[in-house]
Amino acid sequence: MTSLAAPSSNTVGAFCAMAAILCFSFVDLGIKLLSETYALHQVVLLRSVVSLAVFGALIMPFSGGLGVFRTRRPGAHLLRGVFIVCANVCLFLGLAAMPIADAVAIFFISPLAIAAMSVVFLGETVGPRRWIAIAVGLVGVLMIVQPGTAAFQAASLLPAIAAILYGAMHMVTRKIRDTESAGTMTIYVILTFLVSSAIIGFFISDGRFEAGAHPALSFLLRAWPPLESADLWVIVMLGFAGVGGSWLITQAYRLSEAAFAAPFEYVAMPIAIFWGVVFFDTWPTANAWAGIALIIGSGLYMLWREHSTGRTREQPRYRR
């Protein structure tokens, strides 16, 4: 029975990962659209309020009601929340300063980072071929970032930092998956976003630190302008997509081995290119296309190896 249950759990986790990434692609698009007008902490606070309402209406009633707040691991939830908040801040600042496809491509060292971290922190096995795939993916990132050349911009490091923090968040998810439900993990992430953005906004929402020298810094430090009615739909979209993506990605890494689920996140890459072309009239450069191909190719190779080796995984019992 164990050998039959493992592929089923991995398959469900893979579909959850792809659905989550579709949600997160809408978040990336919304953040990019709002980044020239609003402050990052303002957008995150408004999104968190909508996400909290959506969670309360659509997820909490089916996740144990108020029991969703009950946890045995408050410290782990705080650590997980800090990781994902910092990852989002870095990624969103990168989106403000870079073409959306380039930022997302660099961020997609995350499946490679997750595979590497799963060895150190989870004791999962990554063979020599997958280590080579990880190295190839990093070469792809270097082709997009182009360190040491005139094309290099410091903002391109932000999505890379975000990817590492994102991977660290999933390591915590895997550690606490046996005692914490997806609903519990999701609500504490929403609350971490809500509290952190409110605190930051309290101290810098007047724009006193804005210098206007860089798009990312302006997005982080500008004063809070009034919300335009035409932008309200974007905030609502961010709230729905954010809570849906958070719940789905939590399920993905609870149900699947981390190194197995991660490559399915590459579905975001063609979506990001599509958003860039349709909304911002930007195409990846030749170097970026080559880097994207290496990053995606390395991740898909790891996925192929996962299937071809046909290893049997022992899966624990899950709370749902």
Image: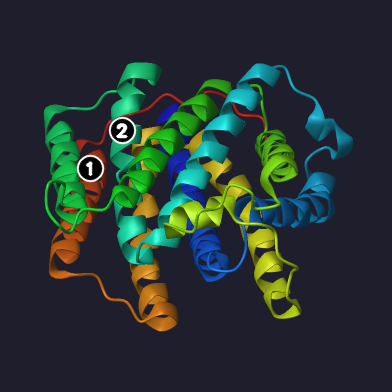
Identity of the residue drawn at 50% across and 32% down: 169
Vertically, is 65 above or below 24?
A: above
Of callouts 1 and 2, which one flags the residue occurring earlier in the amino acid sequence?
2
Q: Pinpoint residue 42: horizontal percent, then vertical percent.
A: 68, 55
Q: Residue furthest right?
A: 66
Residue 1 visible, this orientation: no
Q: Secondary structure at mark 1?
A: helix
Closest to the observer, 187 or 67: 187
Quarter of the image that includes the C terminus: top right
Quick check: 272 left or right of 190?
left
The reply, left or right, for residue 276 in relation to residue 131 is right
Q: Is residue 235 left or right of residue 95?
A: right
Q: Quadrant of residue 312?
A: top left
Q: Which x, y percent locates residue 318?
A: 61, 29
Q: Amino acid at mark 2?
A: Ala
Image mark for residue 188: none
The amino acid type of the residue labelled 1 equals: Met
Q: Are marks 1 and 2 in contact (CB under 8 Å)?
A: yes
Near mark 1 (Cα within 10 A), the count class, few <14, some 14-19 or many ≥20, is many
Q: Of residues 146 and 276, which is closer to you in this image? A: 146
Image coords of residue 179 (percent x, y): 65, 22
Q: Nearer the viewer, residue 213 or 300?
A: 213
Residue at (70, 50) in percent of width and height: 205
Residue at 84 percent across and 31 percent down: it is 67
Q: Is residue 204 left or right of residue 209?
A: right
Disc 2 on helix, strand or loop? helix
Q: Position of residue 59 (x, y in %)?
A: 76, 49
- Numbered mark located on residue 302 in the image: 1
Question: Which of labels 1 and 2 is toward the front?
Answer: 2
What is the number of the mark on residue 115?
Answer: 2
In which quarter of the view is residue 126 placed? Answer: top left
